[in-house]
Amino acid sequence: MDTFPATLLALAITAPILVGLILLAGRDLPRSFASGFAFGGFAIPAVLGPWLLILWSNPSTAPQQFQSEGFWGFGFALNGLGAPLLAMTSLVGLAAGIKALTQEVEGRNTYLGLILFMLGGTLGVFGTNHLVGFYFFHEFALIPTFILTLFWGGEGRRPAAMQMAIYLTAGAMASLAGILIAVDASGVEYGAATFESVAHGLQAAKSIPAATGALVLFGLGTLASLFPFHSWAAPGYSAAPTPVSMLHAGALKKFGLYGIILLGLSSLDITGGSLGTWFLWFALANVLLVGLICLTQRDLKQLISWSSVAHMGPIFLGIWVCGVSGKADGLDAAAFLMVAHGLSCAALFLLANAVRARAGTYRLDELGGLATRTPILAALFIAATMASIGLPGFGNFWGEVGVFLALRAQPLWLQALVASTVVISAVYALRAVAATFFGPASEALEKRFASAPFGDLGWAERFAVFLLLGASLTIGFVPSLVTKSVNPVVAGITTFSQHNAKAPVKAAPAAPAKR
Amino acid sequence: MPSDLSSLVHWILFLPLGAAVLSALFLRRAGGLAAWLSTGVAFAIAGLSLKLLTSATADVTWHVELAKFGGVSLGFGYLIDANARLMLFVVSFVAAWIHLFSVGYMKEDSARGRFFAGLSIFMFSILGIVVADNLLMTFIYWELVGFSSYMLIAHYFDKDYAAAASKKAFIVNRVGDLGFILGIAMCLSLYGTLDFAALKDHAAAAKTIPVAVGALLMCGFLGKSAQFPLHVWLTDAMAGPTPVSALIHAATMVAAGVYFMARVSFLLAPQVLDFIAISGAGMAALAGLCALAQTDIKKSLAYSTLAHLGIMGCAIGLGHPELALMHMAMHAFFKATLFLGAGSVIHGCHHEQDMLKMGGLLKKMPLTAATFIAATLSNCAVPFLAGWYSKDAIIEAAYHGDHIAIFAFLSLAALATCLYSGRMIRLVFLGEANSEEASHAHESPWTMTLPLVVLGLVYSVAGGFLAHTIIPAGSLKPIEHALGEVAFHLAAPSTIVGLLSLVIGFFGALKFYGTVRGADALQVVSPRTYHLLEHRWMDGLYRWYVDSVQRRVSEFIAFLDLLIINGVAVRWIGGGVPAVLGYLTGRSFHRGQTRAYALWIVLGSLFLAWFLIAR
């Protein structure tokens, strides 16, 4: 067995964590040294992540999963769904790292170290096959998220961090309970509890406790901001420092979706029965109600945060329709959107912060006419906005349209409600663009410019945005980069859900027997 | 050799994309270079399209699969039939001259790099619509056309009206696209494919086509071709630079909807066709009359475009997509000339767009005037000019098919055309100068007048040449057949109606609008009629919807979210957890709240991890 890719994977995950440890330990390390070191910690995964994705899609290496021992017994391994998410995370991580390196903060080394922890944990989530490891890495990333928001966040950081901590802890507890019950029901030893073995065990299991699916769906759903468990998300992202918002909304949040797909959809009947109905309505609420809430936002960062919640709707619906129809296209599209959304969302957070750095505010009614002063910032912001509202050429388009098409066998009203997102998102996104960049420059902005002239987007930030949007364009033009690795995993899951749909023996007979 | 020709198509499609990327990334400050790069590419693709038009004898097809979502293939490819070859040629030829015009028109502009990058990305998108071999790719280019239009309308982004107009154009188009994508999903669901060729086979095999398929696909057409009730964006779109109005909002983009409807005409059920025919005819008459109540020369021309798009839609509805395409081609030539002429006038009058402040320009701008008048006469369907062949053929088709109501509407549209054309000529070129700017008007440079001469004099006038040579080269059989089918000739009822309209309308308007100076004669004579035509009723309706319905509903939902989900769940249920924890841990939790909380999470997680591993 070729161990080279497995080494790369282990290196990608451990490098940021080790660098983070050094920075945390060496709080007094000289600035330039710490910066170089931290940059290495961000850059190594960004090189390895895409490389691993390409290796993964390569037929000669594809059957292997790049397994290695990893930490504490739960090994690293990469599956076809994790590979593109890991690649996306690594790029978002580098962009967030560059942003963090350009910031002037107190306790800089600790700040950078914690962000590196967050990155390492998130990479670990997608780079392990083991359920316990999967959960552990998420917690490992989440704790620095709270701390970073609490100490380095912006306006309203305390209540936001508290609310986020409560929600996410509750969600994590519920999903942990679900995971434990599922593992128990599957009859697999904890040491061997990988996604595949648990799924196999559950498929063979005589009975699965009725609440397992709900715990997994709503527990993990909370972490992925499924309506109505979304209240933490927008204030949480908004209050967090920008690199943290980028990593959390872009990459870490996908943990919940990843778990819902690999555990819930593949072996617990989360789209059947009344649970499935709730899932559908909640996901629709993500698209519609949260979409409408976006229309009322008056603050650029809040808007981006809310829209990031709204964009989860199509992903949930893609997962739902896959479970209902037993067809792969919805899940393929949802997975694609998970990757693409991470890129566009991170770019938007970064650029919004650049707007604030210049105009001194996120408030849309105080902004205006910035494009005359900062044409490149404006152009990139428009590009990122277009990516997020699914303009063809960017990856998000394939995901969104793929979900719409996957819903084709559903009633027309349902399709119309879901597809209405193309209008709603265009309304709020273009309104924000116009309010921020177009029109004559606002008085406040002109005064600010006169007192402290600001320049266009700096080179470091430009590079970070080019990286993210470039990646989005790349998968937009060559979608097979993602689908090649995602398709086989999804096909495996649908084989099961088809089997499930034909013979709904699992939970259904157990429930009436209890009554 | 089809394979050679498909490589020709690669060049046609990707040259402008390359030019756009180059300009956007590297030529932001080198506006002149960007202008000539973009223009050079436009002429190159015009040449390649002409080669394709003359050398292709059969459909050119090429296909590759980009990826798969489950069983759904995401394919990229070309299907270039006779209609596509014609459309390619018309679009690229008109576009090339408009590019040249832009070189002169935008000379003083500080953002030429962005402007020409926008034109090139537009070229890529529109040519993509023409060559695409499946619905999904069409939708992709369709969206990109919407994006390029957005960017170009927003060219003067520091003006509030341009910011608003760009946003409006994009959003209204997306409303249409919402229906379009649902239609695509329905095709996939019903027929299992999105390829035009396969869809055509399925449609031929099926006894009936569900009405919903055509109705949903039609939504895209309503948006892009600015048909009622989604027409509201087009007049605002005139906020963009005039060459953009000429290229995108008169000659090509809005015609893409017509082209698309012709391309999927086999998917349109009779009910859908009837709707398009009737609404198109109504649109033609109404928009033509509305053009009489605009003093901005570009807005008046925009209404004229709406009217002609209605006529094209009507032709499709009547079951004559070939006639619609022919009118699309003819209209592209003369309307581009009219818009460029308007641009030249605006340029000459130092950016004055109000027709009431113009006048007497015939002597000061003779070349512009001559070409503008020629194109106007073509617009009025004077026999043997370009517009006559196509427009009157469509009116004749309505008469011939016993659609008397449609014939009546179209006749009214013909009269309205002559009225606003006469008014325009009278106000702009005849009489005396009505402002300082107009009295100091000057003729435009050669880069602007040459395109006018080529497009206007050669093509608008030489309608016979167009109708009998260039256009049939793309689709000889269908048009000869279509013209024969409606028994179109000089003594046909449509021509008689046309000639009557010309005499009454055109010459009547010339006289009528000469009676009042510095004001609109109709407004003076009948202010109510003028207001009725000027007022934008649908805009009012939409504004009411946005302000009174959409905003209130969304604010109400946001309030509920805050009150119920956030308020109750977090403050009561969620807030209970830290309260209990705080009670248990005594004051330490309160004093170092944040640190303690972080510590709690760390401890809890470590405990969990230990618990899991120890088991």
Image: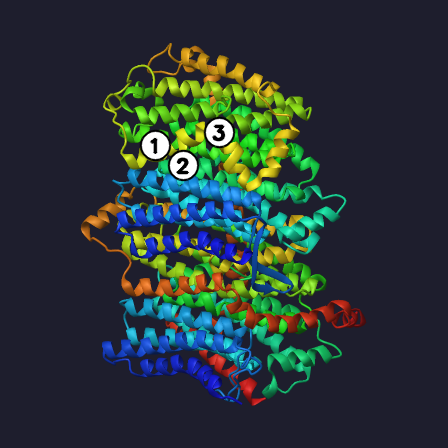
Residue A404 visible in this rendered orientation of the protein? yes
The residue that mark 2 highlights is B245
Which image quadrant: the N terminus of chain B?
bottom right
- Amino acid carrying mark 2 in the image: Ser
Query: Which residue is at 29% across, 18% downward?
Result: B434
Query: Which residue is at 45% across, 65% downward?
Result: A250
User: Which is nearer the eye, A469 or B432?
Assistant: B432
The residue that mark 1 highlights is B343
Mark 2 touching mark 3, by CB under 8 A?
no
Q: In this rendering, which labeled residue sits more in front, label 1 or label 3? A: 3
Label 2 and label 3: CA atoms lie apart by 23 Å
Give how far across and how far down residue A295 sits, in percent. 48, 47
- Amino acid carrying mark 1 in the image: Gly
Label 2: chain letter:
B
Say above or below: A320 vs B146. Answer: below
Give residue B487's mark: none
Neighbours of disc 3 within 10 Å: few (<14), some (14-19), many (20+):
many
User: Quick one: SS at disc 2?
Assistant: helix
Give how far across and how far down residue B157 sits, in percent. 34, 42
